[in-house]
Structure formats: structure tokens, C-alpha cells
């Protein structure tokens, strides 16, 4: 006979995370399904093991850390931002960017004691970090500043972006890097994405202030929020044109060759 | 028994009691994590880069814990029993570091900014304090 056990809300996990079944992060509800023969194993789990699961395991093995996009400009979650999903691994973030880290430990927010990260409050009210210096920065979970206690730690890498990368939505919904000018027809709507890149061309996570502008002004209609890193543009005028994007302190320009629609 | 004899007996008991409380002779410091920019962590001192943190197991001993002498982490199988970690207190000084207790005997030392700090190891079961110097090195000096 199987016994289904539902535990809501999740147990306190200051010292040990349970070996549980399924973890649902978005609504912060954890469900545990044990069969009777597995109860002994489950009891062992509460004694201190951390199961495989989503999120990056902390360096002491007591908690898991999750990267979350704090703002829609973050290139790490272009398609997932609105769903509230968290990334499984902690990516490198851009210098000056804003990002959020969550943990399995519900007693407190993630915390960093160093001068390299600054806690900021984003418009949603969530606590996020601003990356102030290049290099490694420690982030801890379960910190109680009055008692001087913590559960676990991890590190995040902060990188100064070296370039702005442009991408176009591909036929299979993927993002295709754009290395040359874009050929378009008048009236064509193109979905574009911009992201800060590291020296190796990898996309850096973290939200930086973004602005889009077309040249000449009448060449494009820019749809959606022009402060997001993903927008739709419509080419309105035939001829050579360009779109310039600023991403933090960097800027990049994408050229267009717009042709009249053949009759 | 006269009052003077009571006083003398009290002093004798106090002296004997004091003599039964051992001193902290040594500590061992064992890194439990490898910082991304690792330097050094043992009982003679801890060096970490600013902005990084390291998980440490810190035990205190009332007897020399190993053949390599005091204040080292070289003892392995023949270490004496450490003082119950629950009875050991770790405090610190210096703005360059923060120290967080994770569990009995397990701590996180974080390098807040370049500079110096000190860990103080004390116990309710032993006299004395052992100091562990901590140096926080600027990340700009990392290779």
C-alpha cells in the first residue's frame, strides 16, 4: 500500500535539506511522496542529505541556489522571465547588472557580506543584487545577522562586458547571432534580441539599462517595451538604415538593407 | 572549624578546581570548501581573496593533537579528542572579515574587503584563547 504525504508549507531547512520527491519552485510549495518502504529512507533524508534536484548545490552541500532574473532586461531569461522560473545553474553576470539569487532556505534571503555586491530592491519588491566589481563574489544562504549564522555559500562570477551581441529569432524559435547586416523587406516584422557578451562571445546574465533607437527615425517602428532586451521592429522605409542599442555603458549598431516588396 | 579554616579550605578547593580545567593547547582548521580563488587555510593562519568565502571545520584541543606539534592541521588518525564543538566559541575582530556559524565546529569565513582579521577560539571547557590570523588579499593580486 502506498501512503501519499503532502507537506505544505515546506519544512524548515536551516541545517539539513530533505531528500524529497518533487520540488515546485514557482509557488514555493514542496510536495513529498513516500511509499511506506521508503519511509526509513526519507527519515535518513531529514538527517542531512541533499538530493539531486534543480538549482546549484551550495559548496557545503546544505542548500541549493537559484539564479532568477530580477528585471526583464536580463538576457538570461528572455523567454522565461514572465513565468518566474529560476535557472538551474548560476551564470556569470555582467558588471553593473542587477540580478537575484534565491535559495532553498526560506528563513531568509540570499546575502552577500562583501563590498562587491550591493543589495537593491527592484520594482517588484524583491531583493536583488547589483554587481559592483569584477571577479568572484560570495553569496550565502540562511544568514541571520544577529546570531551570526548561515547555512551555505556559493560564488558568482562578475565579468565586464566587452561587446554587445545581436540575435534574431530563428525558424525554430531559437536565437541566431547576427554578424552582418540584416536584409529585410518593407513591412517585415523582425524579433531582435541584444545581450552583453564576455570576451569569448558568451552571453552574460544580469539586467543592464537598455535603449533602442532607429536611424533614420522613420525607418523603423519599434514595438514592445524599448527598454527590454527583446523587441520587435518593423522596417517601414526602403534603403539603408540602422538600429543602435545601448546596453549599460556599451553600444552596438546593427545595419539593415531594406527593400521594397516586389510586386 | 574556624572561619579562617573555612576560608583556607575554600581557597584550596578553588585552586584545585582551577587546576582541573585544562588549557586550549591547539586548534585544527580544515577547509570544507575550495574557494574559487584559493589561498590557504590552516590553524597557523587563513588567507583568502576579498569577496570570497570558505567553509571551515575548526576543532579545539586540550592536548597536542598530533605528532607535528601544536597549532597545525597535520594530525590525522592519532588526533586527541577535540573539545565538544558545541562548547567552543569562535569570535572575530577586524572589518576585513565576517564569520558565520553553520553548525557545531563548522563556520564560513568571508573576506569582506582587503585587510586583516583575527579569529578567537575559546571554550567553556578550557582556559585560554587561541588566535588565528586571517589575511584578506585583494582579488587584483590573483593570478
Image: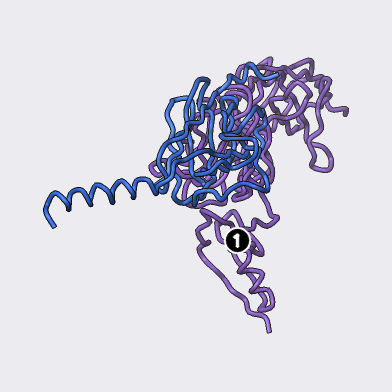
Is residue A129 left or right of A146 when viewed as pictured? Answer: right
Q: Residues within 10 Å of mark 1 (few under 14, many from 20)?
A: many
Most extreme residue toward the left is B2
Residue picked out by circle 1:
A18
Residue depicted at 68% across the width and 18% down the height: A244
Is residue A261 left or right of B40 when viewed as pictured? Answer: right
- Work out whether A102 lies above or below A34: above
Q: Chain of mark 1?
A: A
Residue depicted at 66% across the width and 29% down the height: B38
Please indicate, yes or no, whether residue A120 appears anywhere in the rendered image: no
Q: Nearer the viewer, residue B39 or A32?
A: B39
Residue depicted at 66% across the width and 62% down the height: A22
Image coords of residue A118 (percent x, y): 49, 29
Q: Nearer the viewer, residue A85 or A140?
A: A140
Q: Colour of chain A?
A: purple
Residue depicted at 54% across the width and 45% down the height: B106
Image coords of residue A219 (percent x, y): 70, 20
Is residue A44 left or right of A117 when viewed as pictured? Answer: right
Q: Which chain is blue?
A: B
Amino acid at each position: 500500500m502506498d501512503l501519499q504525504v503532502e507537506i505544505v508549507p515546506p519544512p524548515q531547512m536551516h541545517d539539513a535539506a530533505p531528500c524529497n520527491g518533487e520540488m515546485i519552485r514557482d509557488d514555493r510549495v514542496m510536495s513529498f511522496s513516500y511509499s511506506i518502504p521508503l519511509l526509513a529512507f526519507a527519515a535518513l533524508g531529514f538527517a542531512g542529505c541533499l538530493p539531486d534536484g534543480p538549482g546549484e548545490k551550495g559548496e557545503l552541500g546544505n542548500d541549493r541556489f537559484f539564479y532568477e532574473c530580477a528585471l526583464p532586461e536580463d538576457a538570461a531569461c528572455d523567454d522565461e522571465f514572465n513565468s518566474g522560473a529560476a535557472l538551474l545553474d548560476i551564470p556569470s553576470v555582467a558588471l553593473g547588472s542587477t540580478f537575484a539569487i534565491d535559495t532553498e532556505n526560506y528563513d531568509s534571503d540570499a546575502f552577500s557580506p562583501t563590498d562587491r555586491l550591493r543589495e537593491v530592491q527592484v520594482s517588484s519588491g524583491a531583493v536583488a543584487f547589483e554587481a559592483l566589481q569584477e571577479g568572484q563574489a560570495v553569496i550565502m544562504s540562511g544568514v541571520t545577522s544577529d546570531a551570526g549564522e548561515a547555512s551555505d555559500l556559493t560564488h558568482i562570477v562578475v565579468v565586464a562586458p566587452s561587446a554587445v551581441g545581436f540575435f534574431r529569432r530563428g525558424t525554430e524559435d531559437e536565437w541566431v547571432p547576427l554578424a552582418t547586416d540584416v536584409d529585410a523587406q518593407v513591412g517585415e516584422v523582425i524579433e531582435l534580441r541584444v545581450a552583453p557578451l564576455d570576451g569569448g562571445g558568451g552571453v552574460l546574465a544580469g539586467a543592464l539599462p537598455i535603449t533602442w533607437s532607429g536611424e533614420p527615425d522613420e525607418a523603423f517602428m519599434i514595438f514592445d517595451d524599448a527598454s527590454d532586451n527583446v523587441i520587435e521592429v518593423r522596417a517601414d522605409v526602403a534603403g539603408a538604415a540602422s538600429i543602435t542599442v545601448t546596453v549599460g555603458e556599451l553600444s552596438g549598431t546593427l545595419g539593415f538593407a531594406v527593400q521594397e516588396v516586389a510586386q | 572549624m574556624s572561619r579562617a579554616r573555612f576560608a583556607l579550605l575554600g581557597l584550596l578547593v578553588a585552586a584545585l578546581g582551577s587546576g582541573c580545567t585544562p588549557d586550549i593547547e591547539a586548534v585544527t582548521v580544515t577547509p570544507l570548501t575550495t574557494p574559487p580563488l584559493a589561498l590557504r587555510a590552516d590553524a597557523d593562519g587563513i588567507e583568502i581573496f576579498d569577496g570570497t568565502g570558505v567553509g571551515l571545520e575548526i576543532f579545539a584541543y586540550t592536548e597536542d593533537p598530533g605528532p607535528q606539534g601544536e597549532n597545525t592541521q597535520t594530525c590525522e588518525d592519532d588526533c586527541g579528542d577535540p573539545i565538544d564543538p558545541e562548547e567552543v566559541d569562535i569570535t572575530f575582530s577586524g572589518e576585513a572579515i565576517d564569520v558565520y556559524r553553520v553548525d557545531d565546529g563548522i563556520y564560513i569565513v568571508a573576506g569582506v574587503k582587503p585587510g586583516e582579521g583575527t579569529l578567537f577560539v575559546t571554550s567553556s571547557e578550557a582556559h585560554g584563547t587561541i588566535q588565528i590570523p586571517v589575511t584578506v588579499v585583494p582579488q587584483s593580486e590573483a593570478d
